[in-house]
Amino acid sequence: MKISDAKVVVCSPGRNFVTLKIYTDSGVYGLGDATLNGRELAVATYLADHVVPCLIGRNPFQTEDIWQYLYRGGYWRKGPVTMMAIAAVDVALWDIKAKALNTPLYNLLGGKARSGVMVYGHANGGTIAETIDEVGRHIDQKYLAVRAQCGVPGLAGLYGVSTDSQPYEPAQKGLPSESAWSSEKYLQFVPTLFEELRKAFGEDVHLLHDVHHRLTPIQAARLGKALEPFHLFWMEDAVPAELQEGFRIIRQHTTTPLAVGEIFNTVWDSKLLITEQLIDYLRMSLHGGGITALQKIAAFADMYHVQMGCHGATDLSPVTMGAALHFDISVTNFGIQEYMPHSRATLEVFPHGYRYVNGYLHPAETPGHGVDLDEALAKKFPYERAYLPVNRRLDGTMWNW
Ligand code: GCO
Ligand code: MG
């Protein structure tokens, strides 16, 4: 079997997605997700202009060799654009391989190691009362784990909290919007949110929280300590993680479990975090080089008691979600999978076989990863410029979003 062609499809059914479709001479095709939120067209051109021509004629079963060809052979290593492009190729090739062998992808990754993939949903509210309602709504839908985000008194608009009664969606059409931030107000407020959530729901539900890179290590240490009585499943992205050593400070002070890594793109971003056991959960999903890379990273993390907690926001297309579920169900050190359901338009453009049942997602049982692309429908949703917001402290200083 040989790769005969490949093309990049950009569409915007509610938000932008970049999809790579690889064709073979046997008629089997595979799909990979190449969506880099806010920088979508950079990956589209990287693939179309620099990667696709190198793929034609290759054996699609040689996932390892093609991965190395694109990584080592590209000379420029790492980085979100490169690794997202490699991920799209890799996931599409694993899709082809599993379809050609007529089996769901998980059977090529070790087979099922559990009966379902535990997920966490998003509960966002402008006030504590609204957040309590949202957590309750998720519990009614049988979620076992819920991430809680809440507006902070004195701050207009906040990460994770919708402004227009629509489901929260970070990317916005047009140029980036700006929001205001105060670490002091946030640190004062968040422990009360979780105190009230535990009072309302007891200890059974797993509660998670995303700090979204807003704190310094010593502030994150303070927050982790203050949240200890409320037994979080994890505190996510407490600080930006370019300085991996920074996590030593957080770790020394708190037993609140730590998660990080949704914007990492190679194992090198987390090497020290893993080997020094500074984190509990690694948030990378397939965007960091695809299945070939994530399997190796997970095996390395497993040696240091780090579990996988794949990113699953709506900026990753249903192709990433569908493929990640095959990884999640087969990997030994699985922790939890994020599940932020896509809009109806997105789900129609990407017909898929994965399904949610009582707190768990289940991968498709059809050959491959089980997510397709309705190209005719995709054409009705052309690309629209959109960005994530940016964030400033109250005095106007640029801060981390
Ligand atoms: C998460 C992420 C998202 C991001 C989004 C940005 O934990 O799901 O932090 O909420 O904001 O993925 O593109
Ligand atoms: Mg996050």
Image (cartoon, rainbow, N blue to C red):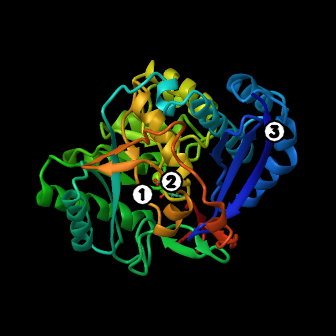
What element does badge 2 sit on? loop
Find disc 3 in the rendering and name its residue: 4
Residue 158: percent from left, percent from top: 44, 70
Amino acid type, mark 3: Ser
Identify which amino acid the numbered label 2 is placed on. His
Of tags 3 and 2, which is closer to the observer? 3
**Quadrant in the picture for residue 364:** top left
Residue 70 on image: x %, y %: 78, 33
**Secondary structure type for disc 1:** loop
Disc 1 target residue: 340
Whether residue 275 is visible: no
Residue at image position (61%, 60%) is 374
Q: Which mark is residue 213?
A: 2
Q: Quadrant of the N terminus?
A: top right
Q: Nearer the viewer, residue 174 or 249?
A: 174
Residue at position x 27%, y 46% in the image: 232
